[in-house]
Amino acid sequence: MNPYKVLNIDQNAGDQEILKAVALAMRERKYPVKEIAEARMKLMDPVSKAVENFICVMDVSPFLKDLNVKPVSRPAVASSDLNYIGTPEQG
Amino acid sequence: MKKKIQGPKSILERAEKLFKKGSYALAKPAFEEINAVLHDEDIAEKIKICEKEITLLETKELIRKGRRSLKKGNLRDAVQYFEEAYRLSGEEWLPEKITSLKAEMAGRKSFEAAKDAEQSGDYEKAAELYEEALSVHETESKEILLRRAHILVKAGKYEEAVSIFGTFNVSDDRAVYDYGFALAKIKKYYDCLKVWDGIPDKNNAFSEQKTAVRSLLAAELYECFEKSKKCVPKPGLGNEEKPGLGNEEGETAQWGRIYGQGKYLADRGELSDLTEYARYSFAGELWKTGQYDKVRELLLPYPSQMNAGKTEVYAKLFFRLAEMSREYLTEFTLFWLTALYSPETYIKLASDETRREKTRQALIQKGEELIKKKYPDCSAALACWKAEKKAVETLHSLAAGQPFPVGTPRFIRKFGESEPILEMIRNNREFFSDTEHYLSTGAYYSSAGQSLFHLHNGNYEEAFEGLPISDKAADEFVTYCIERVYFEYGLYCLEKGEPGIGRYFETAAALFEKSPEYEKSFIDKAMSSDHLHEMQWYENALTDIYAKRPVKKIGEALSIIMARRAIRMQNKRQLSLRGTEAVLKKALKLNTDNELARTSLESMQAELDLEDLIRAIEKHKINKACQIAVKSQHREVKEEFLDFIRYNVEHLDDPDIKDRERLFLLNDFAKWCARVDESHPLMKDIDKRLDALK
């Protein structure tokens, strides 16, 4: 169970936001009450919230840091400049 | 000869005959001739039948001719025949056929006209005419469609051309070129290149055009990348609001497209970093939607350089996958502990130290619970986890405060360097509470460490095969591994009942010296052995080990196993009393407190004395027998001897025995009897007999 999904909030949500999200989730009834209560409990406790943050949030930036994406400029030719040359074998 | 004039009767007879034969064309005029006179209703009816049959025959003939014309490709004649046939018969199917043939005639005209228009360069007109021709040429529709698509390309109507080509599996080189060209013109560069890959690159113009399209694709992907980069790399859960950047599904698809199309160029040496960027960003987006299997596909193979951040990503990914399938437990345990013990990851867990440590411990606990609760039957995975946890915890404590790479043994072997870790363990010998802890920690990180994990997984053959071959200069950690693997492989072979397993225990004494826990486990196994062959094997192994390591515990275990085995064999008549006695005495010598050997020896003594007594009597060595009876502490031995004497005394009543001889024998009996038991009633009997003789 992903408590952030259940309460539809992100990992930076504070206690007040969590409580509001709990009330909203209870009204919307998209998830069982038990799951909403469990999500609330997990996110209101600092340690279990940190645990959930670790498990639920993935940061791919460590893979991106090593990459050196070089700019690609537009080529001189545009698609409209392409000329029909017929069957390649015929030249 | 003059023609015979026929009467009405003969005409009617002839007409009837022809009617019956089915010659309606001949029958009809005959019937008409006679009915002009007779005006008979029956004949009138027959005339009608003849007319109907004649029409039918004519229709058949016309249809046959129509079909023949159709075969010859003469549509015009065919239509005429079918129309005449319809006029005669009114057959229901004919109008449809006639319409279809007329349409085909019109189509042919359109097709020919289209070809003419094509040749004169009026491509738009040609395209229209081909479309007209298509409406009637069902059987040749593919060819006409391709012609039309070709003309549409020439007419610059690329979208239409692409929609036609897209419905076919185009294989003809010209069509493939046209299709690709049309795709390029509508800026579908990737699709164009994929289509053009289907034809050989045989001339420069085509090669240059392909290169131009590749450049256009690269530029387009880069622009797309620049737009998408604005929202990545932001780690998230998929719940964030993203103003102005479209929805999450759009971003995911966008990165997916950049990756998929970029991969095409990257495989040909272009845009490799951009494609990699898109690959990982795409993975990040898929993670948010919980598509962990697809994320795994994107993140594998592992990068050549692993760092804390990447380790953390793999740890999370395989945690999620292991939640779904045991297939990923190995990878999960490979990354999880290493990630949590990495200082870079640890610092991000929480804002203060106390909470950080609590979070780490909670995450470790969560990992362990995943194995325990989700896969309670995976004891091997749990054993590996525990071994790695112990090793990494030790390493973490050892490296406290030092900038040192901490990781589980399997992780270090796969992504790091073991030697600096081994060096640190060696240099901090005093840190370890005991030799076993020191050696086992080093062993897991050593070159033979993988064998120890094979042992945890129950893969004994792999563990044994994985050991270094005859490494005389092996360091202490490798030596420890070898001893552990030999020891456990030996036990495995013992359980399988394999012969010749003694060699696997040659190093057991050295292992026991370092790790008393293995000695204890071995002794426990030996003591719980129940079958004779097992006992014998443990006795042999313990004898060898005791010779190298004569410690009390081994001696005691050996003593008990020896006694047990000898008694069991004696009970099964596989060992003589004397042999059993010898073994028990040997066992007692090894361990004087062996109560089993002692009590067994004592209870055997009566039997042993009796055996000796009987043997002496059988050999007529009565003095020796008397001595045995005197020495024996068992009443039954003495009684056995006295019974023998009584038996002989009673036989002295035989009249053939002379008195003198009887007297001589009675004196001997009295002497022996007195030595064994002076107060025995037999003594009185002998005395009485002696008195009577005297």
Image (cartoon, coloured by chain):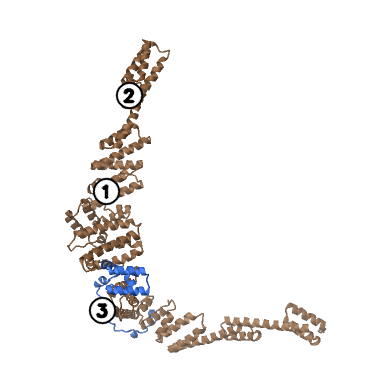
Q: Answer with the quarter of the image where residue B215 lies.
A: bottom left
Residue type at numbered disc 3 = Pro
Q: Nearer the viewer, mark 1 or mark 3?
A: 1
Q: Is residue B275 visible?
A: no
Dot 1 falls on which chain?
B
Task: Check the image and report above or below for B652 versus B407.
Answer: above
Q: Which residue position is annotated with label 1?
A: B518
Q: Answer with the quarter of the image where residue A50 lies.
A: bottom left
CB within 8 Å, label 3 to label 2:
no
Q: Earlier in the sequence, mark 2 or mark 1?
A: 1
Q: Nearer the viewer, residue B631 or A49?
A: A49
- Taking the spot 42% from the left edge, 12% from the top edge, the residue there is B656
Q: Answer with the quarter of the image where residue B293 lies.
A: bottom left
CA gap, disc 1 and disc 3: 63 Å
Q: How many C-alpha atoms fall within 10 Å of the one at disc 3: few (<14), some, or many (≥20)?
A: few
CA gap, disc 2 and disc 1: 50 Å
Q: Nearer the viewer, residue B267 or B273?
A: B273
Q: How many C-alpha atoms fall within 10 Å of the one at disc 2: few (<14), some, or many (≥20)?
A: many
Q: Which residue position is annotated with label 3?
A: A71
Q: Which chain is blue?
A: A
Residue type at numbered disc 2 = Ala
Q: How many C-alpha atoms fall within 10 Å of the one at disc 1: few (<14), some, or many (≥20)?
A: some
Task: Check the image and report above or below for B693 versus B476.
Answer: above
Q: Nearer the viewer, residue A16 or A65?
A: A16
Same chain for the residues at labels 1 and 3, yes or no? no
Mark on residue B629?
A: 2
CA gap, disc 3 and disc 2: 113 Å
Q: Nearer the viewer, mark 3 or mark 2?
A: 2
Dot 2 falls on which chain?
B
x and y percentages locating residue B93 in the rendered image: 61, 82
- Taking the spot 21% from the left edge, 65% from the top edge, the residue there is B354
**Position of the N terminus of chain B by quadrant:** bottom right
